[in-house]
Image (tube, helix red, strand yellow):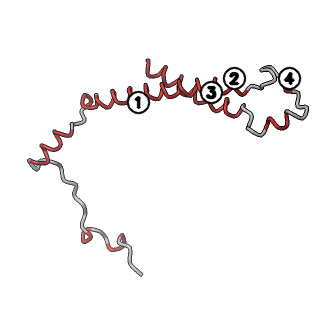
Amino acid sequence: MIETLVLIVHVLLAAAIIALVLLQQGKGAEAGASFGGGASQTVFGSTGSGSFMVKITALAAAILFATSFALAYFAKERAANVTEVGIPSVSVIESAAERNQLPVLEVPRSADLPSSDIPQAD
């Protein structure tokens, strides 16, 4: 439940960061505004929306990092519980290998294959 909520917040933050970055003006946009661009009539004042948008983007990025760490923690906890679903641990596999009780994959020999299946060299 919590993992799903963190994942939803993470995806929404990623989309918000993309939108915020695309909405910001580039460094060269101030030159055009100084020649009568009407910057004093903007919503954010004559200084522009730069500092406001930068702060919101930085806050969204910080929360995105926090949700990334939370998702990594959830993944680590899930990986620690893998032995509960029947996958043997490394120590079990190594002890079986020492006793030569591991299943062996039988690879067909080339003599067992029909000659039409074997590619011929030029």
Residue receiving disc 1: 72
Q: Nearer the viewer, mark 1 or mark 4?
A: 4
Q: Where is residue 104 in the image (x, y as percent from the top left)?
A: 19, 53
Of 46 and 98, the residue lying toward us: 46
Q: Residues within 10 Å of mark 4 (few under 14, many from 20)?
A: few
Give the answer, above or below, for where 53 lies relative to 117: above
Q: Where is residue 42 in the image (x, y as percent from the top left)?
A: 83, 22
The outermost residue toward the top is 1
Residue receiving disc 2: 52
Of pointers 2 and 3, the one earlier in the residue sequence: 2
Give the answer, above or below, for where 27 lies relative to 81: below
Marks 1/2: CA distance? 30 Å
Marks 3/4: CA distance? 23 Å
Q: How crowded is mark 3: few (under 14 residues within 10 Å), some or many (20 or more)?
A: many
Q: Residues within 10 Å of mark 2 (few under 14, many from 20)?
A: few
Q: Residue 40 carries which label?
A: 4
Q: Tell me whether the residue at label 1 lies in contact with that at label 3, contact meaning CB atoms closer than 8 angstroms.
A: no
Q: How crowded is mark 1: few (under 14 residues within 10 Å), some or many (20 or more)?
A: few
